[in-house]
Image (tube, rainbow, N blue to C red):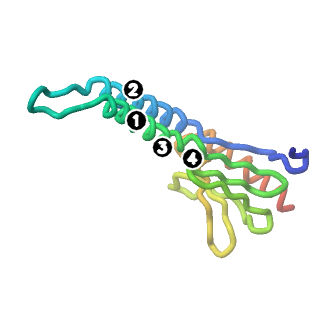
Amino acid sequence: MTDATTQPTFEARPRKIKVYAWTIAIVLIIGHGTVGLLLTTGGDTGPLFRPDDKVGMALIGLILAGGALLFTRPRLRIGPDGVSVRNLLNDNTYPWDVVQGISFPPGSAFARVELPQDEFVAIWAIQARDGEYAVQSSARARELVDHYKGR
């Protein structure tokens, strides 16, 4: 159980990419399911599609849809313990002693956590395509970084 001192004070998630990902996932499931149902035997000279092939086509659609839904995972959490960045496949927490700031460079698709020695980590949770939400999230994240870093 987490106590109040370790709970995050800010959380950001992407907005538009969730809609895109769910739409693509639904289209993939419906499309592959439909193709699976429509697979037929081509007679004496055509391909032989068995029920396993039909089920396999639907399963391929489900697997691809699951891949599309990975784009709903990104999250940024900021709290007393540091900055936690979850992107598509990884989830890392950076303690305050290594976090130098949060920036959103011009022309960049994502905000980023600035780390020592010119290193950075992209924050997929704050995306340029989200427009005003990205601006507000970046501003709030910078405020909290300044607060926790004592600036």
User: Is tag 1's residue or tag 3's residue first in the polypeptide sequence?
Assistant: 1
Q: Which residue is mark 3?
A: 67
On-image quarter of the N terminus: top right
Residue drawn 74% across the image and 56% down it: 83
Where is residue 139? Give x, y as percent: 71, 48
Q: Which residue is mark 2?
A: 30
Q: Which residue is mark 1?
A: 61
Which marked residue is nearer to the observer: mark 4 or mark 3? 3
User: Is tag 4's residue or tag 1's residue first in the polypeptide sequence?
Assistant: 1
Residue drawn 53% across the image and 43% down it: 71
Which marked residue is nearer to the observer: mark 1 or mark 3? 1
Q: Looking at the rendered structure, which numbered label has been put on residue 127?
A: 4
Secondary structure beneath dot 4 equals strand
Give amino acid for label 2. Ile
Please rate how many residues cluster around mark 4, counting C-alpha atoms within 10 Å: few if below 14, some from 14 to 19, many from 20: many
User: Is tag 2's residue or tag 4's residue first in the polypeptide sequence?
Assistant: 2
User: Is tag 3's residue or tag 2's residue first in the polypeptide sequence?
Assistant: 2
User: Is tag 2's residue or tag 1's residue first in the polypeptide sequence?
Assistant: 2
Residue drawn 73% across the image and 43% down it: 11
User: Is tag 4's residue or tag 3's residue first in the polypeptide sequence?
Assistant: 3
Give amino acid for label 1. Gly
Mark 4 and mark 1: span between their CA atoms? 27 Å
